[in-house]
Image (cartoon, helix red, strand yellow):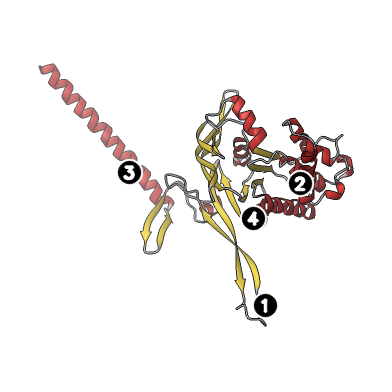
Amino acid sequence: MPEIITCENLVKIYKIADMEVLALQGLDLTVQQGELMGIVGVSGSGKSTLMNVLGGLVRPSAGKVIVDGHDLLKLSDTAVNKYRREKVGFIWQQGARNLIPYLSALENVEMPMMLAGRGGKKTRQRAEALLDMVGLSERKHHYLPEMSGGEQQRVAIAVSLANEPAILLGDEPTGELDSITSQAVYDAFRTLNQELGVTILIVSHDPTVAKQVDRVMAIRDGKAASETVRRRRTNGEGEPETAVHEEEHFEELVVLDSVGRLQVPKNYRESLNIKNRVRMELVDDGLMIRPVSEEEQANFVTSAKKGAAIDDETAVHSWQKLRNKLKRK
C-alpha cells in the first residue's frame, strides 16, 4: 500500500514566556494507506503534539511532514483550513466536544456535509449509512442527553467521517469509558477501517491498545522509541478431525531513527546500571551493548580531561614560540 503519512526528523518547539519546550525531537514515522494504528506514550511524551501536527492544528517547527500529498510545512493558512475540513476527521476524548447537544444523532452527522455545501437525499443517506456502520441506526433520532457515553463517541466517529476524510485521528477516544463500552468503540473503528479503507490513528496512554489495532508506535521524549505489531499464529495441522486455532502474537521492535539512533528504555538502563556511556561491539549474530562500570567511566572522564589539558598546554606553547619568532623579526 502507498504511504499516506511521512514524517522525517519532525520537530515541534513550543514557546512559553521566555522558555522553549521541545515537544517533538526529530521524530520519524511512516503510515501506510488504510492502516489502523495506535500511538502510545506517557503524559508529555509528544503523542498529542504529533496528532495536532498531523491534523493541521499546530505548525511543525522543522523537519518534514507530508499527509496525503500535502506538505504541512509549506501550506498557507487558507490551505491549512481547507486541509482540516477535507482531509482530516477528529475525535476527542470528551463526547460533548464532538457533538451539538440540541441536534439528533442523524442531524449531527449531516451537519459537516451541509457546512461543506452538500445537502438533499444523498446527504441523509450517507448519514444513515455511517450510523448503521457504527451500530446506531436505531438511535439516529436520539439526542445527546438520551445516549450513553459510548453511543456518543460512536456518533462522533460517524460525524468525523461525514466528509470522507483521508485520515481519522482519535485523541484518547475511550479515555472516559469503561472497558465494555470502550470495546464497542474499538469495534466501530475496526468496521469502518475495513469497510471504508480509511486510515485511522488512535492516541492512547494505555499500552493494551495493541490488542485493538494492527500496529502501535511508542513515543518517548518526543521520538519514536518502539513499534509493536500484532500477528496471528495458527495452531493445528488442519486435518478434518483437528481443531485449528488462531492466537495473537505481539512482537515489539526498537525503532532506529534516520541516523541510526535508538532509545534504551529507562527500566533496562536502571537494571544494568547504565549511565551515559556503554560499550558496543559487533558479534556473529548481532550487536552487543555492554554497560561500563562506574570506575571505568570515572577513569575515562579523568583521562579525557588530562588529554584536553595537555592539548591546551601544547597550543599555548606553540603560540608562545610563534609570538617570539615574530618579535625577533
Q: Position of residue 5 (x, y in %)?
A: 55, 43
Query: How many other residues sit within 10 Å of disc 4, few (<14), some (14-19) or many (≥20)?
Result: many
Identify the residue position indicated by label 4 in the image.
210
What label does residue 243 carry, if any?
A: 1
Q: CA distance from mark 4 to mark 3?
A: 47 Å
Residue 130's label in the rendered image is: 2
Could you tell me residue 217's position as x and y percent? Answer: 58, 49
Q: Is residue 50 above or below residue 212?
A: above
Q: Residue furthest left?
A: 329
What residue is rendered at 85% in x and 46% in y?
148
In this view of the protein, which residue sits in the foreground, 1 or 283? Answer: 1
Which element carries disc 1, helix, strand or loop?
Answer: loop
For the point 85% across and 36% down, which residue is it? 103
| Amino acid type, residue under disc 4 in the picture | Ala
**SS under mark 3:** helix
**Inter-mark Cα distance, 3 to 2:** 68 Å
| Residue of label 3 | 303
Marks 1, 4: nearer the viewer: 1
Question: Most extreme residue toward the front, as rendered?
Answer: 121
